[in-house]
């Protein structure tokens, strides 16, 4: 009962309370919800201010892209090739006009280079292409100012960019920044197979005589190493490549073997390891007797090469020009970009070939070809490299659309036996060259060499024929049977007190056919100012270097570049030796320091002496270096 009484009481109380609550709502709350207009008032919330977004500052990353578009490297990496693309990657979509205006690339002299820019689809990557090749061993700077802004908010990059990159060293096979050397020994092997030796400049500077790689041997009687040269950078990867030629018998067409440079290389290679094997058109062509770097005559960024075949084209001789992009695998003579056929029976057109261009550049080269057996005089032909850029072609040696000048020698000169660019001896802004005329077949065999000013031929629009009287300077000897001019080379400037490049000339049979040999270094300043120079007259040479025995010192000469790590270029002299006459003779190659050349008189003064592996292998018959 108590429970029911309490429950009923609470029910009554709850009923009374509910009625009071409803009354309160009707009397107090509802009227307050209405204003005089009868609308329910709504209070306006305090607005939250919209934050202003902070603009994102674009970041910049630079890289170097190889011509094959597959290799991307940091600008700080080495070695970088002479042609490629600068890729600029931004973190934001950019205003293309502002970026292009704010971006430039300058050369070592601060001159702005001509470039062409292209963007990716979303305008975050700018790629710059160069119109010409860069220079060897040179520092360039990529500049991007803070005028480069983003597209959405015109926000500039955080800081101006000034990033430096450095191009590859010339003739640097392994990419360590020091010039390397290649030596041919064409008679090595029991059947004259031939061998070539590649030496690291860094090792030579440390007085090490170990070869970086021994390359051989060729086929029987192929005489691999009769010619050897650095080929430039034919695959545009930043490493200098090498090419080695042969002097094959009538049963073979002849070959040249090309090896790509790389950071590492096997200590022993064979001809089957070559990255490209170039072969002649027919048996007996002697394809490969001369090999040479000729720059980039078609301006595609890949180094090009020339190959001489002295017995091709019905024994008149032929020179083949190959573009670097084609040099992979088996390469036949018929695939040459340009073919230059000699016109004189048994003239030996293509006996020597040289690219005439600045020491540190591969742009717009001219091409010099020797024909030492032309009419008992000898001749040399200078071709305009730019004439070959439009289309592949086959021409005759005297085609006036390509040949700028024919230089004919004196009687029994054998002009064109050797040749080399020498730099700008005459200080007129053009590259000069030297041609050897050893008078090999003459009874006296004095020999001579002629230095020609490139400026004298730069304006020739069609073939002119001149004699050696047109030379800037004629260099001779009073010692008969010297065969002066059997080898010639530019070596750069080794003379203190001026900046004119100097030359080296070999006279391997001085003073007679069964004794010693000599090499002469002549000042470029003297050449520029003196019409006739006799190397036997005191004061006419910087130094005269002699050797004892039958060494044939001067059989090969070349500029070595900067091997000994100083600011003066070095030089190399080959002494192939008459071992069959003097068995005590050791065929050798001598590296001389340009900085110390004034104290040099004999081969004992060489910084390094490289020697044969076996007797009578003709080690030092060919030497390839910077010139």
Image (tube, grey):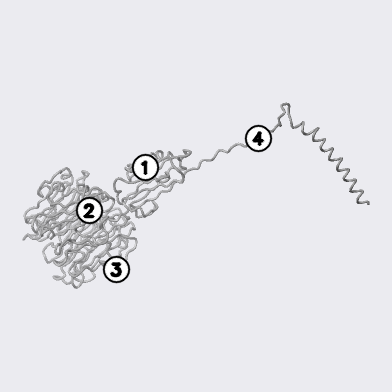
Q: Closer to the camera, 44 or 383? A: 44
Sequence-wise, the earlier of marks 3 and 1 is: 1
Determine whether label 4 and label 3 are within 8 Å by CB. no
Sequence-wise, the earlier of marks 2 and 4 is: 4
Give the CA separation, mark 2 to mark 3. Answer: 28 Å
Q: In the image, 412: left or right of 391? A: left
At mark 3, the secondary structure is strand
Give the CA separation, mark 4 to mark 3. Answer: 85 Å
Determine whether label 1 and label 4 are within 8 Å by CB. no
Residue at 29%, 46% (x, y): give it.
Answer: 132
Q: Please tell me how crowded label 1 is: few (under 14), some (14-19), or many (20+) other residues with Cα within 10 Å.
A: some
Q: Closer to the camera, 354 or 4? A: 4
Sequence-wise, the earlier of marks 2 and 1 is: 1
- Res 107 quadrant in image: top left
Q: Which residue is mark 4?
A: 46
At mark 1, the secondary structure is strand
Determine whether label 3 and label 1 are within 8 Å by CB. no
Q: Which residue is mark 2?
A: 294
Give the CA separation, mark 1 to mark 4. Answer: 53 Å
Mark number, residue 268: 3
State the image coordinates of residue 377 (x, y, percent, origin top left). Answer: 8, 54
- Please name which of the two marks, 2 or 4, marks the residue nearer to the observer: 4
Q: Which residue is mark 1?
A: 104
Sequence-wise, the earlier of marks 2 and 3 is: 3
Give the CA separation, mark 3 to mark 1. Answer: 45 Å
């Amino acid at each position: 009962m108590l429970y029911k009484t309490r429950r009923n009481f609470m029910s009554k109380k709850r009923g009374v309370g509910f009625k009071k609550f409803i009354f309160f709502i009707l009397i107090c709350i509802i009227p307050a919800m209405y204003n005089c207009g009868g609308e329910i008032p709504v209070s306006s919330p305090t607005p939250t201010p919209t934050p202003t977004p902070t603009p994102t500052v674009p970041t910049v990353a630079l890289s170097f892209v190889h011509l094959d578009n597959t290799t991307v490297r940091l600008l700080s990496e080495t070695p970088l090739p002479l042609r490629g693309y600068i890729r600029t990657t931004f973190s934001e979509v950019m205003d293309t006009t502002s970026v292009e205006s704010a971006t430039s690339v300058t050369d070592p002299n601060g001159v702005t280079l001509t470039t062409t820019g292209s963007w990716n689809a979303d305008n975050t990557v700018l790629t710059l292409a160069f119109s010409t090749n860069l220079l060897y061993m040179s520092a360039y700077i990529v500049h991007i100012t803070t005028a480069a802004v983003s597209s959405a908010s015109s926000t500039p990059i955080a800081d101006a960019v000034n990033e430096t990159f450095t191009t590859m060293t010339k003739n640097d096979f392994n990419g360590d920044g020091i010039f390397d050397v290649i030596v041919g020994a064409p008679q090595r092997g029991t059947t004259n197979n031939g061998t070539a030796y590649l030496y690291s400049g860094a090792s030579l500077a440390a007085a090490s005589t170990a070869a970086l790689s021994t390359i051989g041997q060729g086929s029987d009687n192929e005489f691999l190493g009769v010619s050897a040269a650095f080929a430039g950078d034919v695959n545009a990867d930043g490493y200098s490549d090498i090419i080695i030629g042969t002097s094959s018998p009538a049963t073979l067409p002849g070959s040249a073997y090309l090896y790509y440079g790389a950071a590492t290389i096997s200590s022993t290679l064979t001809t089957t390891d070559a990255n490209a094997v170039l072969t002649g058109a027919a048996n007996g062509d002697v394809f490969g007797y001369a090999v040479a770097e000729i720059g980039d005559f078609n301006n595609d960024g890949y180094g090009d090469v020339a190959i001489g075949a002295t017995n091709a084209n019905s024994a008149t001789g032929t020179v083949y020009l190959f573009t670097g992009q084609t040099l992979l695998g088996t390469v036949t003579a018929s695939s040459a970009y340009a073919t230059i056929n000699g016109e004189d029976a048994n003239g030996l057109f293509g006996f020597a070939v040289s690219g005439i261009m600045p020491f540190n550049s591969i742009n717009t080269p001219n091409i010099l070809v020797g024909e030492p057996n032309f009419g008992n005089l000898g001749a040399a032909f200078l071709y305009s490299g730019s004439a070959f850029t439009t289309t592949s072609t086959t021409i005759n040696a005297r085609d006036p659309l390509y040949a700028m000048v024919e230089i004919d020698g004196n009687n029994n000169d054998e002009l064109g036996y050797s040749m080399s660019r020498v730099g700008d001896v005459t200080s007129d802004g053009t590259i000069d060259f030297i041609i050897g005329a050893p008078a090999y077949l003459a009874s006296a065999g004095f020999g001579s060499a002629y230095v020609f000013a490139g400026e004298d031929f730069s304006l020739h629009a069609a073939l002119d024929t001149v004699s050696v009287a047109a030379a800037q300077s004629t260099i001779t000897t009073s010692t008969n049977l010297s065969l002066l001019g059997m080898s010639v080379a530019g070596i750069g400037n080794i003379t203190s007190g001026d900046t004119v490049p100097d030359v080296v000339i070999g006279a391997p049979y001085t003073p007679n056919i069964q004794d010693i040999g000599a090499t002469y270094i002549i000042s470029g300043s003297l050449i520029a100012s003196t019409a006739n120079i006799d190397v036997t007259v005191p004061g006419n040479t910087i130094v005269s270097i002699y050797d004892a025995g039958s060494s044939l010192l001067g059989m090969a000469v070349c500029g070595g570049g900067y091997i000994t790590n100083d600011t003066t270029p070095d030089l190399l002299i080959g002494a192939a030796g008459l071992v069959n006459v003097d068995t005590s003779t050791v065929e050798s190659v001598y590296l001389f320091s340009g900085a110390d050349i004034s104290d040099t008189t004999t081969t004992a003064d060489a910084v390094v002496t490289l020697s044969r592996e076996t007797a009578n292998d003709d080690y030092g018959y060919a030497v390839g270096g910077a010139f």
